[in-house]
Image: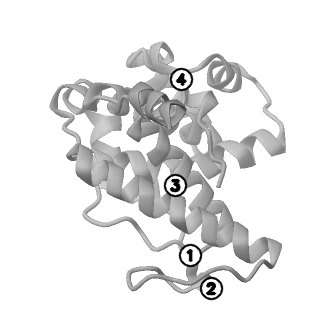
Amino acid sequence: MDELQDVDAEVVPRTAQEVAERALAIIATIGKVHFPEPNAKWVADENISRFLTPTEAQFIGSAEPSDQERIDYSWKAEALASLIWSLHGLEHMPPFDEQFSPFDNDLVLCAIRNTETFLNDARIRTGEEVDAMEAFLYHQHWRVRDHEFGFGMDIPGADDPDISELHPGIVYERRYGMSWVAGFGESWDDVPTDT
């Protein structure tokens, strides 16, 4: 029991500033996939590189990223959905069988068009809201894994979507993002997602 209490004591939720900075980094990596030239200008003009992990910086700086890198970073749009929700940029988490379209989101567009305003005005949902969403996403991730392995242990709760409405990749990425916001993992590249 003491070990569990020690783990919980180490979890410190990210601040609004940290979440906003991380959102900018993710927007930059997704932008590299979809709009490489205008994205490179934005990254340089707004000094976004200060928020990138070494792995992200390598991707952003690559003249010709691999197809797999492009796919991997485009999936980060789903993790971004969790960060944008945390920053009040989404009223509800999007459905788990629909991809999040970051460049159709007002807060993402604000982050691109008015980066300093986005950083200065960032406000995060309450700790209770973040913890509840992280627990919900953890549970949905568990349900997806149970279904994939064919264990048949899934007994959905009243608020749970039908298992057919849970795309495994979307659930995983949104859970990854929300777990990071909630304080799990020492860095963005080191977020635990065991079920």
Answer yes or no: do the residues labelled 3 and 2 have beta carbons within 8 Å? Answer: no
Seen from the viewer's position, the closer of residues 194 and 100 is: 194
Tell me the kind of residue under disc 2.
Answer: Ser
x and y, in percent, of residue 95 in the image: 46, 74
The residue depicted at 44 percent of the width and 33 percent of the height is: 5
Q: Does residue 131 sit above or below 15 in this rendering?
A: below
Residue occupying the point 26% across, 32% down: 16
Could you give the CA–CA distance between mark 3 and mark 4, rounded to whole angstroms? 18 Å
Residue at the spot 32% in from the left edge and 49% down from the top edge: 130
Residue 95 placement, left or right of 112? right
Real-space Cα separation, disc 1 to disc 3, in angstroms: 12 Å
Name the quadrant of the C terminus.
bottom right
Which callout, 3 or 2, points at the residue further toward the start of the chain?
Answer: 2
Find residue 191 and report its horizontal and vertical position in percent: 59, 35
Q: Is the C-beta separation of discs 1 and 2 under 8 Å?
A: yes
- State which quadrant residue 118 falls in: top left
Q: CA distance from mark 1 to mark 2?
A: 8 Å
Q: Earlier in the sequence, mark 1 or mark 2?
A: 1
Q: Which residue is mark 1?
A: 97
Label ID, residue 186: 4
Mark 3 vs mark 4, foreground winner is 4
